[in-house]
Image (cartoon, rainbow, N blue to C red):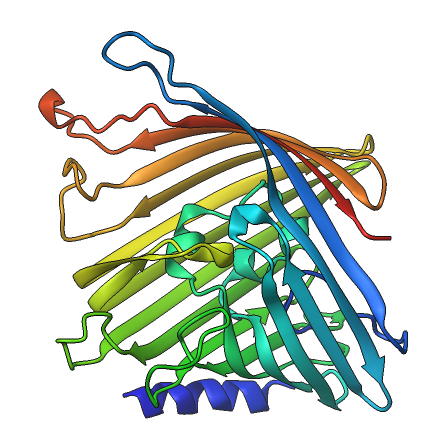
Amino acid sequence: MKKIYFAALFILAVGLPNAFSQGCMDTPSSTTGPQIIGYVQAENITKFLGADASGNDLTENSFAFRRARVGVTGTIPYNFSYYVMTELSPTFKGPYILDAFFSWKAAKSYLKISVGQFKSPFGLELSTPCQSLYTVDRSLIVNELASPFRDQGLMFSGSSDSIQIFGIEKPNILSYSLALTNGTGLNTMDNNKSKDIIGRIVFAPCDFFQIGGSYHYGKEKNPDPTITKADVLSRWGADLQLKKSLGRFGLLSQTEYIFGKDEGSKLIGGGCGSTPEVVQGSFKRNGFYSQMMLQTPWKIEPVVKFETYDPNKDLSDSDHKEFRRSSWIFGFSYYVNDWTRIQMNYMYNLEASSATDYSQYNEIKNDMLVFQLQFKLK
């Protein structure tokens, strides 16, 4: 079965003449020699945790660095480029190497071959660089089901040249990425001979409409040394992006669904360098997010986002151990200039509960207010 999936993805890759973001920032297209890149995201986070049994306020407030990244990128004659990025933030237990890969543009826009440690080519939101996200962090389903965010391996990517479809001439109508990775994540050697297969393809016939699909399959050793049977991980996702100009304004809508199946054990968390938790068993998980942004001529961009994640489809939503979690996120981004951005997000978190049995109510005091200041290295 694994060979069939690989063959299908490989046919898509070589048969479909913009590749997706492999790192945090775009690499230069023509500048030769090294170029310093990076950005810092400083935050103030307020967690509204209610009160304890004695009535003491448990609200937390802290300043933190969500990300502090510095790297170097550049091109080498002819058609070669390199990219190295480090994570320095103590929030993510830095410093360490985040990305480090070497690329060869083998056939214009049609084929680029990269080797090293890079971002997994899965999904719309994960393919969006961190400093370009419309909310301060990625969705819960992406953090849970698209991990590991980064891995070591080999990637093929590319896109179509400018072609005409539906009477409209446009570049990058079809784009793809196909990666073979260890499957063990950031800065970690493989623990078996199997390799994970991760593929993504996007169809964007016009500026208004874009649809994408992603797939991930892999086998890993079970973290319990007494279990010899390999864990099996499979993921698939679909995403849709719509854009519409309304005079001086613009609307951008994004929706993404991910389904995951884990046989043997599953990882909880693990996105953006955090350490995942291992839980034994077999699980089916899914969720989606949908967000809408209003682009205005005043450099301010309001955003509304809804996301929901079910960590175990075989359990009732009223179960206290694993229940559906949802969030409404309201906020805005204000672009001071090309290098500086201010974001505010209020996260109203909802936990699933039984509509008829209030003893099974799972509501938790865990709403959050986040202010983030981001600046890029010029």
Left of 330 or right of it: where is 280? Answer: left
- Residue at image point 49% right, 67% down: 122
**Viewed as shown, does residue 361 lie left or right of 172?**
left
101 lies above or below 129: below
Q: Is residue 162 visible?
A: yes
| Residue 82 percent location from the top left of the image | 74, 78
Residue 362: image quadrant is: top left
Q: x, y percentage for residue 259?
A: 33, 60
Q: Residue furthest top?
A: 55
Judge by depth and name the residue closer to the eye, 128 or 18.
Answer: 128
Q: Quadrant of residue 62?
A: top right
Q: Residue placed at 47% from the left, 68% from the top?
A: 213
Quadrant where the N terminus lies? bottom left
Side of 256 relative to 340 (left or right): left
Residue 372 position (above or below residue 162): above
Camera-side residue of 302 and 266 = 266
Depth order, front residue of 73/204:
73
Residue pictured at 28% horizontal, 15% vertical: 52
Tally of marks: 0
Residue 211 at x, y percent in the picture: 54, 63
Placement of 269 over or under 17, stated as above or below: above
Left-right relation of 164 to 339: left
Q: Is residue 164 shown to the viewer in this render?
A: no
- Image coordinates of residue 246 in percent, x first then y, are 75, 38
